[in-house]
Amino acid sequence: MLKNTTVSWGRISRSLHWLSAVVVFGLFALGWWMVDLNYYSDWYKTAPHWHKSIGILLALFTLARVLWRLAQPTPKALGKSWEIAAAHLIHCLLYLLMLAIFFSGYLISTADGRGIEIFDWFTLPSMGELFQNQEDTAGDVHRWLAYCLIGLAVLHAVAALKHHIFDKDQTLVRMLRNTKSKDIQ
Amino acid sequence: MKKTLIAASFLALSTGFAQAADYVIDTKGAHASINFKIQHLGYSWLTGRFNQFDGEFSYDAANPTSAKITVNIDPASIDSNHAERDKHLRSDDFLNVEKFKTAKFVSTKVEDKGDGKLAVHGDLTLHGVTKPVVIDAYKLGEGKDPWGGYRAGFAGTTTIALKDFGIDYDLGPASTHVELDLHVEGKKK
């Protein structure tokens, strides 16, 4: 099944979710590592180029992901009502943080009017300097929101494991494979 | 009348220091700049400047050695025409502008080298480190401006070792020193 139902995540939503997870953690690690690279490192220019290219592609991908999410039914959340409310809040925050991180990252590199070259395929144009000290302010925002995103993503994963191990419900399983209504507790 | 003139010029000679005019560096009209250049890999010059600074000097053409100059620089205003590089230059790899919010030059002694050339000795504070430097300067000119004011202008250069100021990020063997290229025009107070 490609599409979602009210009891299961379809193949498309699941793929979008896991690809996003891998790329988000990958970009975080790449960003963490690249800022301390030595000037003579082979990666000094390549690592930021890839970080920016993949980041912009993930931004476009995430827009599609959000549209798909809004257009599709979603499986009914499992757990106590406060858990469902907390999960919903964290899902919203994860999306908002990602969008804010994409935008702040864009603002760092485009503060001087230069566009961002995406893998030498195309250049995303700059909107110019929108406010003073843009690269510094956007840089601080980019870094701290990335820490927040990773923190929340870990919490999100721990919560999924808690559902799997302690509550023994389908929350994690249905993000891994197709589930049928009879599987749901 | 003649006596008064003689007396006045005598007074002027005897109190040469007091006659030195005070000038404000014309940063308002941007007739001054603090530029720098450093080699990139030993293949070319990378140039940039500090956009925010202010200062004043006193100068008397008849007694150049009594000249004094003070310049305050906002290191966060470094501008090499590349946002990502400027962000890096402001970080703790280089100027650490969050910790060291000001840079300044205060002259201590001016030597007259003749022909309008001056050696301006002074203390440069950068990255929280204060070191003596000597600026090789010369006067371009002075005189009335078309709008009722009086101006005097100088240019100078000095070279500093980044390591002397506690900046030890490795940019390679050709890029250990920075040349500062200074242009000031003062408006008489």
Image (cartoon, rainbow, N blue to C red):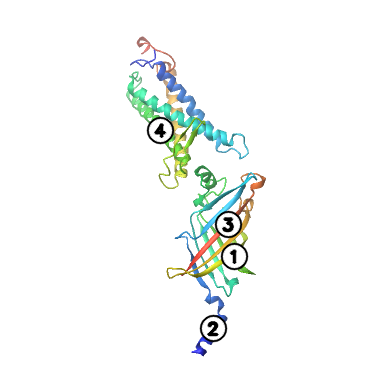
Most extreme residue toward the front, as rendered?
A: B146
Callouts 4 and 2 in the same chain: no
Callouts 4 and 1 in the same chain: no
Q: Nearer the viewer, mark 3 or mark 4?
A: 3
Q: Which residue is mark 4?
A: A99
Q: Is residue A12 above or below residue B25?
A: above
Q: Quadrant of residue A170?
A: top left
Callouts 2 and 3 in the same chain: yes
Label 4 marks a residue whose chain is A
Q: Quadrant of the N terminus of chain A?
A: top left
Proximity of marks 4 and 2: CB atoms separated by less than 8 Å: no
Residue A103 placement (x, y as % from top left): 42, 36
How many other residues sit within 10 Å of disc 1, few (<14), some (14-19) or many (≥20)? Answer: many
Q: Residue at x 50, y 66 (%)?
A: B186
Q: CA distance from mark 1 to mark 2?
A: 27 Å
Q: CA distance from mark 2 to mark 3?
A: 37 Å
Disc sitting over residue B138 in the figure:
1
Q: CA distance from mark 4 to mark 1?
A: 55 Å
Disc sitting over residue B181 in the figure:
3
Could you tell me if residue B167 is visible in this image? no
How many other residues sit within 10 Å of disc 4, few (<14), some (14-19) or many (≥20)? Answer: some
Three-letter code for the amino acid on which mark 1 is drawn: Tyr
Q: Residue at x 45, y 25 (%)?
A: A20
